[in-house]
Image (cartoon, rainbow, N blue to C red):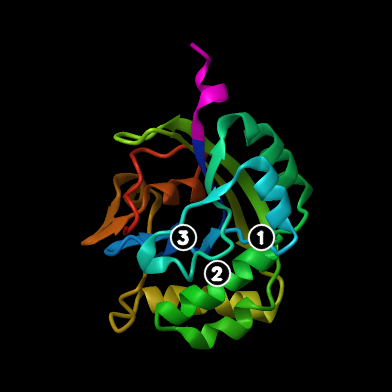
Amino acid sequence: MAPWHTRREVRISFSALLRVKDDDRHVLLHSPSRPGSFNPPGGVYKCFGPAAAVLEELGFRADRADPLADDMRSDLRGFLPASALPRFRRWFACGAYRESPAECLRRELAEELAESGVPHLAPDASRIAFRHLRSVDDGPHPVPGKPFRQLRRFEVYEPVVTGAEATRLCRSLAEAAADPAVPAVICATPAQILHGRSGTALIGAHAAYLIGDRRARPELPMVR
């Protein structure tokens, strides 16, 4: 029988995450795709029109959850023949026809700040720069009950806090997390992130990549 990497599909999802700290606490935002849970700001990279031919040649098949299909349009989230994975990695690494980390993070911040009830912070988010902290490949590994393996790549960045905009954004997010009137923003310590709870709030497993290159438990499934 042929090995799995020549005969199976791999579900891929490539994302940029943002680490915003207040002392030893990390800012997390409520996740509409996983109601009741909180995750780092950021999300899946989007590709541009010319990428369609590249992805078609690789055999890419988009994965779009029905309730969020419009929001997921052009996401680098979907299925590939396992044999195409090395070529997809090389294409992604070259950066052609896809968002840069800064473009992805600024777009995601604008969307997530509005969803979290603090849209007035978006102008500052659009002006800040970012510093790369780490990149983590989670997988490919089997998914219980599914006929495919999954690879998720998380690229973790933090704001470059050298200007007024970044300083103001980080301070304002920490203040929002402490404000009961803004329930969609919380702060969590490393211990809470690894435990998976901050009070009554569930914390997504990939929040662990804010503090290291391992997660302690499976991720909560998305809404379908």
Question: For the residue labelled by badge 2, is the local secondary structure a helix, a strand or a loop?
Answer: helix
Q: Residue at x 30, y 76 (%)?
A: 183
Q: Is residue 78 visible?
A: yes
Q: Which mark is residue 108?
A: 2
Does residue 109 appear left or right of residue 104 in this picture?
left
- Type of residue at label 2? Glu
Q: Residue at x 57, y 31 (%)?
A: 82
Query: Given the current orientation, which residue lies at the most extreme bottom position?
Result: 120
Foreground residue among 81 and 115: 81
Real-space Cα separation, disc 1 to disc 2, in angstroms: 14 Å
Does residue 94 appear left or right of residue 74 in this picture?
right
Span of residues in magenta: 1-9
Q: Is residue 19 visible?
A: no
- Type of residue at label 1? Cys
6 is within the stretch colored magenta: yes
- Type of residue at label 3? Pro
Cβ–Cβ below 8 Å for labels 1 and 2? no
Q: Which mark is residue 40?
A: 3
Residue, disc 1: 47
